[in-house]
Amino acid sequence: MGSGTFDHILERLILESTMGKLKLSISEDIKIHRIKRTIPGFAAKTVERLWRLVRPSAGSSATDPKPMVGFLYGSQTGNAESLARDAAALAESVGIHILLAALDEIDADDLLGLSEVVFFLSTYGEGDMPDNAELFWETLSGTEAPQFYGLHFGVLALGNKNYRDFCRAGKQVDARLEALGATRLIARLDCDVDFEEPAARWTRDVLALIAGENSLSANLNAGALDAQASARHRSFSAKLVERRRLSGATSDKDIHHLEFGIADSGITYTAGDAVGIRPVNDPELVGAIITWLGFNADALMDGKPLDFILLREREIRNPPVELVHAVAERTVDDNFRAVWQSGDEQALRDFLHGVDVVDLLSWAPPASLSAEDLLQLLKPLTHRCYSIASSPLVAAQSVHLTIGSLRYVRGNRAYRGACSSFLSDRLVKGTGADIFIVPNQNFRLPTDPSTPIIMVGPGTGIAPFRAFLQERQAIGASGRNWLFFGDQHHDSDFIYHDEILNQLRDGVLTRLDLAFSRDQPEKIYVQTRMLENGADLYDWLEQGAFFYLCGDAIRMARDVENALIQVIAQHGGMSNPMAQDYVARMKREKRYLRDVY
Ligand SMILES: Cc1cc2nc3c(=O)[nH]c(=O)nc-3n(C[C@H](O)[C@H](O)[C@H](O)COP(=O)(O)OP(=O)(O)OC[C@H]3O[C@@H](n4cnc5c(N)ncnc54)[C@H](O)[C@@H]3O)c2cc1C
Ligand SMILES: Cc1cc2nc3c(=O)[nH]c(=O)nc-3n(C[C@H](O)[C@H](O)[C@H](O)COP(=O)(O)O)c2cc1C
C-alpha cells in the first residue's frame, strides 16, 4: 500500500472521528485491519489506537446509527468462508450493517466493537483450528483474553464425523466465548459433510434473531441461501486430456500427472487454487453392496437405478457412524461385537481404521438392512480437493493436477481411495469428470513479483509450486525462488524432475534442495535440508521472503514448522518463544502460507 493511501485514511479517520461523524464501510474496516497487519511499528500502532477510538461500538448511535454484526470465518478449503459470505450477503440485503472477515483479519478485542457475531468455523488437521483462525484462537484462549459481557454470538461448526475430534474448533470457540462472558444468540450447530441444508436453516434462524423475525421475513429471499449453495459447487464436466505416471517403475508411490480441458467451461482459476472433484465409486465395491442387499443393479429406488445411486451419489469408502451403529445392532462378527461391547472408543476407532462399507456390511447378515435404510444411512458422496499444478498464464485451457493414489492393505484385502483411484485408474482419457474450482485466497503468490519465495513441497505437495513457478516464469518475476522437494528415492520419486532441473538451469529456480529419505542409511527429509541451510533460509526470511508449505498435514507440516522455528532461533539469535513470535508475525503478515491435507 502506498503511503499516500495510508496517510489519506489516517487523515480521514482523525478528521471524521474528531468530528463525530464516522461512518465506516465494510471495505474500509477491512482496509484498516490490513494496514495494521502490513505496516510495522509506530504507524501500525497509530492505526490501532485510532481504530479503537473510532470503531463502531455495540448499539452506539452517536457516531454510527446501526450496530455492526460480524460474520467471521475460519476456513481451510473455503466451505466455512462461503457460508459466511452467503450469510453476510443475505444479512446486508435485509439492511443489517455487516463486517465480513477472516478471523486472522481481526483481533479478539475487536469483537467488543460488534453487537452480534456469527462464527463459521471448520476444524482441520487433528482437531485443529484452520490456519486463518489460529492466531485469533491463541489470543482468545490466552490468559489475557478480554471479557465479552454484552456480546451475543452464534457458532456454526463444520467438520466430519469420521474424525475423532468432530467440530472441535467450533466447540472450543463456542465454549471459550461463553466462559468469557458472551451470550449465545443461538445454540451451536455442528455440521457433518452434508452441511449445506442444515447450515442454511441455522443461518436463516440466526439472521431472524438478529434482524427481528418480522423485518427479516418481510424482506428475506428465503431461497437465496439454497441458490447460493448450489451455485457454489456447480461443476463442469471436464474432459481428461492427459494422464501420465510420474512415479518410476520401482516406486512405492503411484503419482500421476493429469490435465483436464476447461475451454468453453467459463471456469477461470488463479495459481494457488484447488479443484473439487466428485468421483465415481469403484464398481466392484458397488457390486458387492448390491449383492449383500440381494438386489439387481438395475433395481429402481425412487425411479433411479440402485447402482447409479451407489456409484455417484453415496459415500461408500468412509462409513458413517450411523451405519456403524446399525451394523453393531445386528452383527454376527465376534471380533466387531467384542470391540463394540467393550465401550473402548479408541479400540473401536483402531478396529475401524481403513474399513469401508463393504467390510462393515459383511459383519451383519446379508440383507439385514433394507436398501432404503442403507441409502438413508449412507452420506452423500462428497468431492475431494486437489491443488492445481498449473498457472492459467501457461495453461489457460486446462487445469493440471498431481494425484497420489491412495492404496493400502488391511488384513487380506487391498483398498484404493475412492477419488484418487477414480482419477488414476478408472477415468478413461477423453471422458469427463465433474470438477469445480475451489478458490484459495490464503495461498497466493506475493503481489510484488520481486519478493523472494521459499516453497516446501515434498511428494504431491509440489503441485501448487509447479503452478507458482510457471506463473513467476510467465510474468518474468524478478523475485528469487527456492524449492525444497523430497520423497523416498531420487531415481523413482523425483517427480517433474525434467521441468524442475530446466527451471534451475534457466535461473527461474534460484535454489533447489532435495531430500530423499531412503537413499541412505539415515533418514533425510525436507526439514533436514532446511536446518542444513538455516543461515541462508533466515537471510531470505529477513529479506521479506514468503514461506509456503504444501503436503501432508500431520507429520510433515509439524516437523517443517518446528524446523523453521529452530532455524530462526539459531540464526536470528533468538530464544524459542521469540522465534515462535517471529513465525506468528509471518502468519499475521500472510508471509507464512500453508496448503496442507
Ligand atoms: C486442500 C487440499 C488439497 C489437496 N491436494 C492434493 C493433491 O494435490 N494431490 C493429492 O494427491 N491429494 C491432494 N489432497 C488429498 C485429496 O483430497 C484426497 O484426500 C486423497 O486423494 C484421498 O482421497 P480418496 O477419495 O482417494 O480416498 P478415500 O476413499 O476418501 O479414503 C480416505 C480414507 O482412507 C483411510 N486410509 C487412508 N490411508 C490408510 C491406511 N494407510 N490404512 C488404513 N486406512 C487408510 C482413511 O480412513 C481415510 O479417511 C488434497 C486435499 C486437500 C484438502
Ligand atoms: C486434512 C483434513 C483434516 C480434517 N480434520 C478434521 C477434524 O479433526 N475434525 C473434524 O470434525 N473435521 C475435520 N476435517 C473436515 C473439515 O472440517 C470439513 O471438510 C469442513 O467442511 C471443511 O471446511 P473448510 O473448507 O471451511 O475448511 C478435516 C478435513 C481435512 C481435509
Image (cartoon, grey):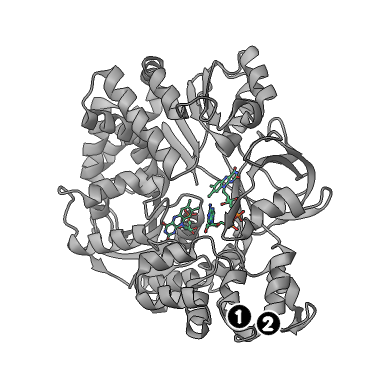
- Along the line of sight, the residue nearer the viewer: 404 or 253: 253
Residue contact between numbered discs 1 and 2, judged by CB atoms under 8 Å: yes
Element class at badge 2: helix
Q: Is residue 279 above or below residue 3?
A: below
Tell whether 319 sits left or right of 366.
left
Q: Dividing the picture into quarters, in which one does residue 176 lie? A: bottom left
**Would you say residue 406 is visible in this rendering?**
yes
- What type is the residue that disc 1 sits on? Leu
Q: Residue furthest right?
A: 430
Sequence-wise, the earlier of marks 1 and 2 is 2
> Between marks 1 and 2, how big is the CA–CA gap?
9 Å
- What type is the residue that disc 2 sits on? Leu
- Along the line of sight, the residue nearer the viewer: 363 or 169: 363
Give the residue pinned by disc 1. Answer: 374
Q: Characterize the local packing of mark 2: few (<14), some (14-19) or many (20 or more) Cα atoms within 10 angstroms.
A: some
- Along the line of sight, the residue nearer the viewer: 149 or 522: 522
Give the residue pinned by disc 2. Answer: 293
**Quadrant in which the N terminus is drawn:** top left
Q: Is residue 11 above or below residue 175?
A: above
